[in-house]
């Protein structure tokens, strides 16, 4: 059973109460405005950012064919498919996340606009070979868990048609696993449940070596920190009901905030085009 199978219900009840996504939020404006902005609005802004970047590279319209790698419950994918009346396929390794995606996005699935499949990002070319080609691929905050990131990125390249767009957001270590001191290593790697992370530079090189053209690349550590800072009190409040798993999750979030504040962990975004 994967981590996201085991904690599916906990995340569902505490992370994103509106759309049940599992993405990090984006927060806009000055400190006061950010303090007032709720998590769910942050998640919406993030989904809009994905759409804006995809659209910048390749037109989104009813002919678009979207692939969401590590889709979770498919919140972003279903937003795109509903907005542009196009078709989308979501892949996730977690049986529980795929089951929730099918329930939450039932209408789109029934109408044949959405298809969810259980499978590994590392083998993405095999999982969706019957659905290719795709015009747009997105992957939000999931590739960090994939054991073979180069194969995942190469698979995505092969699945895209020429001119197609790929938007990736992911957690990135800012210093190597060896360099980081032991206490912080626990925050960066154990709290995130991470094997080996790719740094921003490693992702950049992997994407260009695979053949992608970089259209936009950015680091957004403050958005990531704001998200976890807002999740901590919410999750502690859930723990007051007596379930210790929420305490465990809140502690992990505290560790992640510490790692971001220390400059050891960040949130990377890449928007790239297949030539
Ligand atoms: C932080 S969640 C993000 C989910 C979704 N992209 C979103 O933004 O709402 C990470 C997701 O990656 C999935 N995942 C982890 N390892 C994976 C792998 N090797 N292949 C496919 N999905 C994976 C998890 O099951 C989980 O649903």
Image: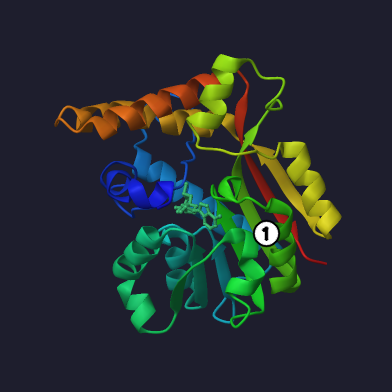
The image shows a total of numbered marks equal to: 1
Report the residue that reaches farthest toward the left.
Answer: 241
Image coords of residue 196 (percent x, y): 65, 38
Q: Nearer the viewer, residue 243 or 210?
A: 243
Image coords of residue 141 (percent x, y): 54, 47
Residue 125 lies left or right of residue 31; in this view the side is: right
The residue that mark 1 highlights is 152
Does 195 appear above or below 257? Answer: below
Can you see residue 219? yes
Residue 37, image quadrant: top left
Does the Cβ of the disc 1 residue fall within 8 Å of ligand 1?
Answer: yes
> Which color scheme is applied?
rainbow
Does 129 appear above or below 53? Answer: below
Q: Nearer the viewer, residue 142 or 178?
A: 178
Q: Residue at x 56, y 38 (%)?
A: 194
Q: Residue at x 63, y 52 (%)?
A: 168
Residue 35, image quadrant: top left
Does 118 appear above or below 262? Answer: below
Can you see residue 260? no
Residue 15 lies left or right of residue 221; in this view the side is: left
Does 275 appear above or below 225? Answer: below
Residue 70 lies left or right of residue 201; in this view the side is: left
Quarter of the figure with the C terminus: bottom right
Residue 56, image quadrant: bottom right
Callout 1: SS: helix
Q: Residue at x 37, y 76 (%)?
A: 108
Image coords of residue 121 (percent x, y): 59, 60
Callout 1 environment at 10 Å: few (<14), some (14 to 19), or many (20+)? many
Q: Nearer the viewer, residue 201 or 97?
A: 97
Image coords of residue 23 (percent x, y): 46, 47
Q: Nearer the viewer, residue 248 or 53?
A: 248
């Amino acid at each position: 059973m994967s981590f996201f199978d085991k904690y599916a219900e906990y995340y569902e009840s505490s992370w994103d109460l509106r759309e049940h996504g599992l993405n990090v939020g984006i927060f806009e404006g000055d400190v006061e405005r950010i303090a007032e902005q709720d998590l769910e609005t942050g998640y919406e802004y993030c989904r809009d950012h994905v759409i804006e970047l995809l659209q910048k590279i390749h037109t989104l319209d009813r002919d678009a064919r979207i692939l969401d790698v590590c889709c979770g419950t498919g919140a972003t994918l279903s937003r795109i498919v509903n907005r542009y009346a196009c078709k989308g396929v979501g892949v996730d390794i977690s049986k529980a996340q795929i089951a929730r995606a099918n329930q939450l996005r039932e209408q789109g699935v029934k109408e044949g606009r959405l298809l969810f499949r259980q499978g590994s990002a590392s083998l993405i070319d095999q999982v969706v070979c019957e659905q290719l080609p795709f015009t747009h691929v997105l992957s939000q905050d999931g590739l960090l868990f994939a054991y073979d990131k180069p194969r995942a990125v190469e698979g995505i390249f092969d699945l895209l048609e020429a001119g197609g767009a790929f938007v990736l957001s992911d957690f990135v270590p800012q210093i190597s696993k060896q360099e980081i001191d032991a206490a912080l290593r626990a925050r960066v790697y154990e709290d995130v449940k991470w094997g080996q992370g790719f740094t921003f530079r490693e992702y950049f090189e992997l994407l260009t070596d695979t053949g992608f053209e970089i259209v936009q690349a950015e680091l957004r550590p403050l958005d990531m920190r704001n998200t976890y800072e807002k999740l901590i009190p919410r999750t502690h409040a859930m723990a007051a009901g007596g379930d210790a798993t929420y305490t465990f999750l809140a502690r992990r979030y505290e560790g992640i905030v510490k790692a971001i504040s220390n400059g050891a962990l960040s949130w990377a975004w890449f928007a790239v085009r297949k030539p």
